[in-house]
Amino acid sequence: MPSIDTTTSRWPDGVDATLTAICLGLMFGVPLLGYVFMVLDFRRYLRSLRRALVVVSRVLPELPYWARLEQPACLRSLDLKFPCTEADVLAAYRERAKSLHPDRGGDLQQFLRLQKNLEQALEFVRGRERRGSAAATTPSDNPD
């Protein structure tokens, strides 16, 4: 009579465990990798939108309503509303400098931050004025 083997082999053996790990790795790794690439691509998409907004702001003499909703931080720190002139920026800076200047008891770091914001605001306003004056003078306006 043939003998019956009563010893049981342990499952999973080495090959089964390796194949199971590879399969589970693919099942969870591929979607996870897809999410990572999606996030990276979304960040690139946002950067391209920012570049497009810069191009649009250089072409249009006045920013559209949706672009004016978010004011630059340099103007917010001076409590200015957009659009403003260079004189407005300087007047707001002088008013804020009176309270933040270290000689009058203000914090040096806040005053340095205010100066940095002043430079950025002046650059922003001067750039807008240059773009506005360039758009105002077209070749048809010149009599030559």
Image (cartoon, rainbow, N blue to C red):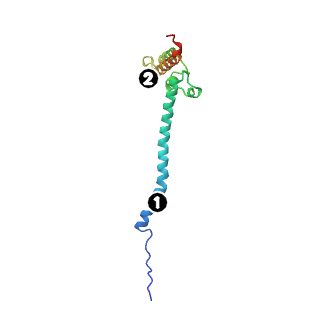
Q: Residue furthest top?
A: 143
Which of 97 and 39 lies nearest the eye of the viewer?
39
In the image, residue 51 above or below residue 114: below
Label 2 vs label 1, nearer the camera: 1
Q: N-terminal of the two: label 2 or label 1?
A: 1
**Secondary structure under the numbered disc 1 in the rendered image:** helix
Q: Around disc 1, counting alpha carbons within 10 Å, would you say few (fewer than 14), some (14 to 19), or many (20 or more)?
A: few
The quadrant of the rendering that contains the N terminus is: bottom left
Label placed on residue 23: 1
Residue 87 position in % (x across, y down): 51, 14
Residue 14: numbered disc: none
Residue at the location (42% across, 63% down)? 18
Q: In the picture shown, does residue 32 fall above or below 74? A: below
Residue ID at (45%, 17%): 104
**Most distant residue in the left direction:** 14
Residue 50 spot, x, y in % from top left: 50, 32
**Residue at the right extreme?**
65
Looking at numbered disc 1 in the image, what kind of residue is underneath it?
Cys
Left or right of residue 66, residue 1 in this image: left
Residue drawn at (46%, 53%) of the image: 29
**Toward which corner of the image does residue 70 lie, by quadrant?**
top right
Q: Dot 2, how many residues are within 10 Å of its Cα: few (below 14), some (14-19), or many (20+)? A: few
The percent position of residue 65, horizontal first and vertical second, equals: 59, 26
The spot of residue 15 in percent (x, y) is 41, 66
- Comparing 89 with 83, the one in front is 83
Name the foreground residue: 128 vs 11.
Answer: 128
Residue 116 is tagged as 2
